[in-house]
Amino acid sequence: MAEIDQGLTDFLRAAMPFAGVLDIQAVSGAAEEVVAEISWAAERCTTNEILHGGYLMAVADTIGASLAIYNLPEGAGTATIESKTNFLRGAGQGTFTVRATPVHVGRTTIVIQTDVTRDDGKLITRTTQTQAVLHP
């Protein structure tokens, strides 16, 4: 478990209130990488006490969007225009790392890869998403 950056967590939740609903805890943020943590909770599960895929997708989209924000030009906004998630294994009880990195940062789009991993480093999901750059 990494050390939580409460200031960054508060910023993320102010920018995207849904991050608070998802109970995302920010660890670090920069244009090159955003890292966060999530924890298992029964209310986020599907059968067999496994985190629901929709929850994992929402977390990946939120952390990916936060990476896009770090890469936006002054005054621009962003919105997800495409997202694809591969589910590689179930996520049972524990704490999980969410890591977003840029694949492409362009003038009109930003492509991001977001991985959710277990404490042992095994990959749970990999999400690739495209964020539109919304110029003022």
Image: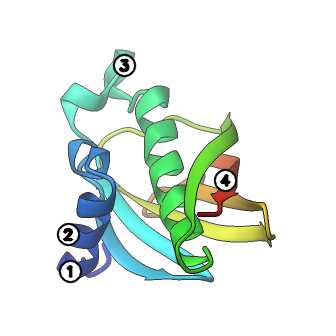
Placement of 107 over or under 47, stated as above or below: below
- Residue 7, disc: 1
Q: Of the two numbered discs 3 and 4 on the same chain, state the one appearing first in sequence.
A: 3
Residue 8 or residue 77, whichever sits in front = 77
Q: Of the two numbered discs 1 and 3 on the same chain, state the one appearing first in sequence.
A: 1
Q: Of the two numbered discs 1 and 4 on the same chain, state the one appearing first in sequence.
A: 1
What residue is shown with label 2? 10
Residue at the image point whose x is 70% and y is 70% from the top: 102
x and y percentages locating residue 71 in the rendered image: 61, 76
Q: Of the two numbered discs 3 and 2 on the same chain, state the one appearing first in sequence.
A: 2
What residue is shown with label 4? 131
Dot 3, crowdedness within 10 Å: few (<14), some or many (≥20)? few
Dot 1, crowdedness within 10 Å: few (<14), some or many (≥20)? few
Residue at the image point whose x is 28% and y is 77% from the top: 8
Whether residue 73 is visible to the viewer of this picture, yes or no, is yes
Q: Do the residues labelled 1 and 2 touch (CB within 8 Å)?
A: yes
Residue 76 or residue 42, whichever sits in front = 76
What residue is shown with label 3? 46
Amino acid, disc 1 = Gly
Amino acid, disc 4 = Gln
Distance of mark 2 from mark 4, alpha carbons? Answer: 22 Å
Residue at the image point whose x is 37% and y is 15% from the top: 47
Between label 3 and label 4, give the one nearer the viewer. Answer: 4
Residue 76 or residue 3, whichever sits in front = 76
Residue at the image point whose x is 22% and y is 50% from the top: 20
Q: Of the two numbered discs 2 and 4 on the same chain, state the one appearing first in sequence.
A: 2
Helix, strand or loop status at disc 3:
loop
Between label 1 and label 3, give the one nearer the viewer. Answer: 1
